[in-house]
Image (tube, grey):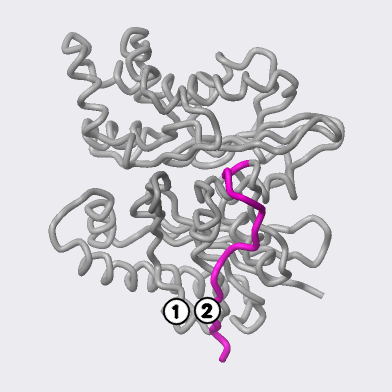
Amino acid sequence: MSQLYLGLMSGTSMDGVDVALVDFSSPHPHLMDCRTFPYPSSLLDDLHRLCAPSENEIVRMGQADRAVAEVFAQATLTLLKDNYIRPDQIIAMGSHGQTIRHLPLGPHGFTLQIGDPNSLAALTEIDVVADFRRKDIALGGQGAPLVPAFHHSVFSSPTQSRVVVNIGGISNITYLPKKGLGEVAGYDTGPGNTLMDLWCKKHTGEHYDAKGEWAAQRSFSPILLNTLCANSYFALPSPKSTGREMFNMPWLQEQLSLHPDINDPQVIQATLAMFTSRTIADEINKFPDVEQVYICGGGAKNEFLMECLESHLHECEVLTTDDLGVDPDAVEAMAFAWLAYAHVNRIEGSLASVTGAKRNAMLGTFSPGKL
């Protein structure tokens, strides 16, 4: 008998909400469908404004909280209709929401995701599990990344040490040691697509550099690359997490101001691709036993970025999660379906070894849609 869950994820790239339909009736979860639904342009503008301090933030946040939930609900109902599945056949959905702040450090560190789970539950009549990150922060953790527990559950091998790399707006890695070799590790490595997307939008009008073709037309700048890599985040020990609060357009412009002679937009785009790939590879290379690296997230489609990454990883086989049977675009949404499944079945959804929390924990808050 099917055990159907939904996972909803929208990352720092804000390119839309990914909705995954997953069946947990067998030991290995089966992805039935996954699709991306874009935000309306007006809401997307508001979300981008909410990622930086501005006037009237609380009102804008409150309204966007409900608006994001409406987009999530419509996306959910569309996916179910297209798969001939009724809402009452879904046990629960796990909703990540949309991050607008992630500042986990300090005595009152916090993370904030919007997309009101009560509205989502009311609009879909499906039980919603949401607000996954704040329990981990309450336990002294970073609240991120959360996907390593899912990666461990689904992608581990008893005979090979692997790394799973998610390249979204921010990149994170999960180290999955083979049996008996150690414990799972994972953290944010730094920028993924976010700086490349911002730079591409600024200079071409396109939201992203399709396949990395624009960047591939130029060589990168080693001097600029070294400047970017000198950021103090990369010297921090794990656990650690980051976001657009640190790596954003004002930060990039500040770095570029140190090299006024480097002004070709495509050279800068090529350097940003090399920046993402080098900072990912530097962390992977800290685990000398790794044999296979699996890429997921939007960055897996950037052929130039993948070539850059391969150039840094000489000892590892670089693949995508397609080779493990999961579409790279679906992994994170599938992870939040798994987190909903874990919540319903009282399974720990976090790894203290990854986030730095006092202990593993069952994550999420429950908003009933069926009562």
Taking the spot 57% from the left edge, 44% from the top edge, the residue there is 355
Most extreme residue toward the left, as rendered?
55
Marks 2/1: CA distance? 6 Å
Most extreme residue toward the bottom, as rendered?
371
- Closer to the camera, 75 or 246? 246
Most common secondary structure along the magenta stretch: loop
- Closer to the camera, 347 or 37? 347
Q: Which residue is mark 1?
A: 118
Quadrant housing the C terminus = bottom right
The answer to if 238 sits in the magenta stretch is no
Task: Check the image and report above or below for 315 versus 12.
Answer: above
Q: Quadrant of residue 338?
A: bottom right
Q: Secondary structure at mark 1?
A: helix
Contact between labelled residues 1 and 2, with CB atoms less than 8 Å apart = yes
Going from the N terminus, do you reach mark 2 or mark 1 first? 1
Q: Give the residues drawn in magenta, as a range.
A: 354-371
The answer to if 367 sits in the magenta stretch is yes
Q: Which residue is mark 2?
A: 367
Coordinates of residue 79 in the picture (x, y in percent): 54, 69
Coordinates of residue 350 in the picture (x, y in percent): 63, 53
Q: Amino acid at mark 1?
A: Asn
Q: Is residue 8 left or right of residue 72?
A: right
Taking the spot 82% from the left edge, 75% from the top edge, the residue there is 1
Q: Is residue 325 left or right of residue 246?
A: right
Coordinates of residue 136 in the picture (x, y in percent): 55, 55
Taking the spot 38% from the left edge, 53% from the top edge, the residue there is 108
- Closer to the camera, 122 or 200? 122
